Image (spheres, rainbow, N blue to C red):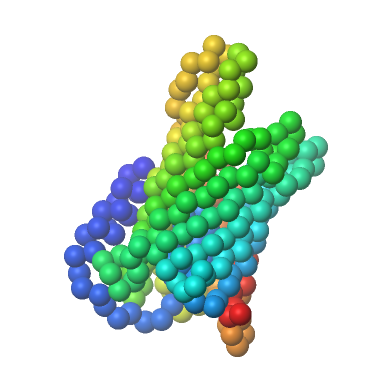
């Protein structure tokens, strides 16, 4: 939490400076923290990610996201399709899909890039197998990004996920709610190689057998790296990270990332 606040403060303090020209480097393609850069006009991005939890649970989470500009860079549409394999394959299948709209409120030429996102969560996963919530929901996220210097970029996120009637307790359906804040610090080692540290706090409302609610928190610290490979108009970005769950005896998972970006 302290790291998140520090990153947000750095972003705000740096916003008082005038727009500067920095050397060219990749600044998007984040993993757990969303950056505030919409897709450029007539450029599409295909993103594949996989997270393998610790060897004890053996759960694997896949995700495919495709991002499209909508009549320019101001608006962006995207879809996220998850696939989950739980407990070494005893339950596997499509999870709940997300339809996303993001608006470029401020860009890099302003005090910071800011792109609020609204998402519809579609109940495409099998609830009985634990692959989805079985109800229509929505998510709101506010990402902000700031290039601090030739060497560093920071990103900050704050958002909420709400799914009405997703939890059944004592024959009563209750609201699923989760709030999150996070931030990341990206070291631009070179144009095409970045080292990164991401920090994510989430707070989920849970219910006991009597229907009483309490707030459970989870803290993730994730070091990683990404590499850009330019092949003509095609940019390929592989990456890898080691998310550490500080709320669960520092258990470590493994996160792989691969994106393809090209004009259309």
159 or 264: which is nearer to us? 264
Q: Which residue in the rendered view is the most extreme toward the top? A: 210
For the C terminus, the image quarter is bottom right
Q: Position of residue 21 (x, y in %)?
A: 30, 81
Q: Residue at x 53, y 55 (%)?
A: 100
Res. 87 image quadrant:
top right
Taking 21 as reference, is 226 above or below it? above
Res. 7 image quadrant:
bottom left
Taking 226 as reference, is 94 above or below it? above
For the N terminus, the image quarter is top left
Q: Residue at x 55, y 72 (%)?
A: 227
**Left or right for 123, reference 157:** right
Q: Position of residue 216 (x, y in %)?
A: 47, 29
5 or 79: which is nearer to us? 79
230 or 125: which is nearer to us? 125
Q: Which residue in the rendered view is the most extreme toward the front? A: 71
């Amino acid at each position: 939490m302290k790291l998140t606040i520090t990153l947000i403060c750095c972003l705000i303090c740096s916003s008082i400076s005038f727009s500067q020209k920095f050397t060219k480097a990749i600044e998007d393609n984040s993993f757990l923290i969303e950056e505030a850069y919409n897709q450029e006009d007539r450029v599409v991005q295909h993103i594949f990610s996989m997270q393998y939890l610790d060897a004890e649970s053996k759960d694997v989470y896949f995700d495919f996201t495709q991002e499209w500009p909508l009549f320019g860079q101001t608006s962006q549409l995207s879809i996220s399709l998850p696939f989950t394999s739980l407990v070494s394959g005893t339950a596997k299948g499509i999870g709940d899909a997300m339809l996303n709209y993001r608006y470029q409120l401020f860009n890099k030429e302003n005090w910071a890039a800011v792109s609020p996102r609204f998402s519809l969560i579609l109940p495409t996963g099998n609830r009985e197998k634990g692959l989805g919530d079985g109800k229509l929901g929505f998510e709101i996220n506010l990402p902000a990004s700031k290039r601090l210097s030739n060497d560093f970029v920071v990103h900050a996120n704050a958002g909420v996920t709400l799914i009405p009637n997703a939890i059944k307790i004592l024959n009563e359906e209750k609201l699923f709610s989760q709030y999150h804040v996070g931030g990341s610090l990206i070291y631009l080692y070179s144009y095409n190689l970045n080292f990164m540290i991401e920090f994510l706090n989430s707070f989920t409302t849970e219910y006991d057998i009597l229907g009483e609610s309490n707030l459970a928190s989870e803290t993730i610290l994730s070091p990683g790296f990404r590499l850009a490979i330019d092949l003509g108009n095609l940019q390929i970005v592989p990456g890898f990270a080691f998310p550490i769950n500080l709320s669960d005896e520092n258990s470590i998972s493994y996160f792989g990332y691969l994106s393809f970006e090209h004009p259309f």
